[in-house]
């Protein structure tokens, strides 16, 4: 299974991820990205059909704010 999450502490609201993977990433009112599938909780499995889009988004993010793991992801709160 594949899980993803946006680290909003480093996201600069560039908007690339939603362009690459509109079914995975959405933006909040300030333009920061979050994962649509699980409200950015890192818990949902990304559908296999969306893995190519996810790869594109991962490579396209200028700040490496998109995290991907085989396991559910929990970001450290800062
Ligand atoms: Fe933010 Fe990276 Fe997307 S900077 S808007 S997570 S491409």
Image (cartoon, rainbow, N blue to C red):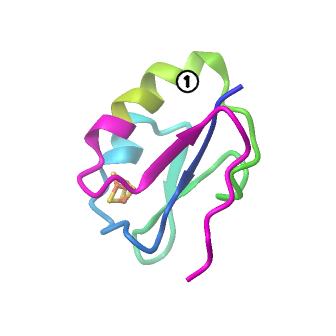
**Where ligand 1 lies, by image quadrant?**
bottom left
Q: For ligand 1, tell me if the residue under mark 1 lies within 8 Å.
A: no
Residue for point 47% across, 39% down: 22
Is residue 18 a member of the stretch shown in magenta?
no
Helix, strand or loop for the magenta stretch, by majority = loop
The quadrant of the image that shows the C terminus is bottom right
Residue for point 61% across, 71% down: 76
Residue for point 76% across, 47% down: 43
Q: Tell me: 67 left or right of 75.
A: left
What residue occupies the far bottom of the structure in this picture?
Answer: 78
Q: Tell me: 14 left or right of 44.
A: left
Residue for point 47% across, 69% down: 8
- Secondary structure under tag 1 reads helix
Which stretch is magenta? 58-78
- Read off the residue under disc 1: 50
Residue 42 in the image: x percent, y percent? Answer: 68, 51
Q: Nearer the viewer, residue 30 or 74?
A: 74
Q: Residues within 10 Å of mark 1 (few under 14, many from 20)?
A: few
Is residue 75 a member of the stretch shown in magenta?
yes
The quadrant of the image that shows the N terminus is top right
Q: Is residue 45 above or below residue 6?
A: above
Q: Tell me: 49 left or right of 19.
A: right
């Amino acid at each position: 299974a594949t899980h993803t999450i946006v680290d909003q502490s480093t996201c600069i609201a560039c908007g690339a991820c939603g362009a690459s993977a509109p079914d995975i990433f959405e933006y909040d009112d300030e333009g920061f990205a979050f994962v649509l599938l699980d409200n950015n909780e890192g818990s949902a499995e990304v559908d296999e059909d969306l893995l190519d889009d996810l790869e594109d988004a991962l490579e396209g993010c200028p700040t490496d704010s998109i995290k991907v793991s085989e396991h559910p992801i929990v970001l450290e709160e800062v």
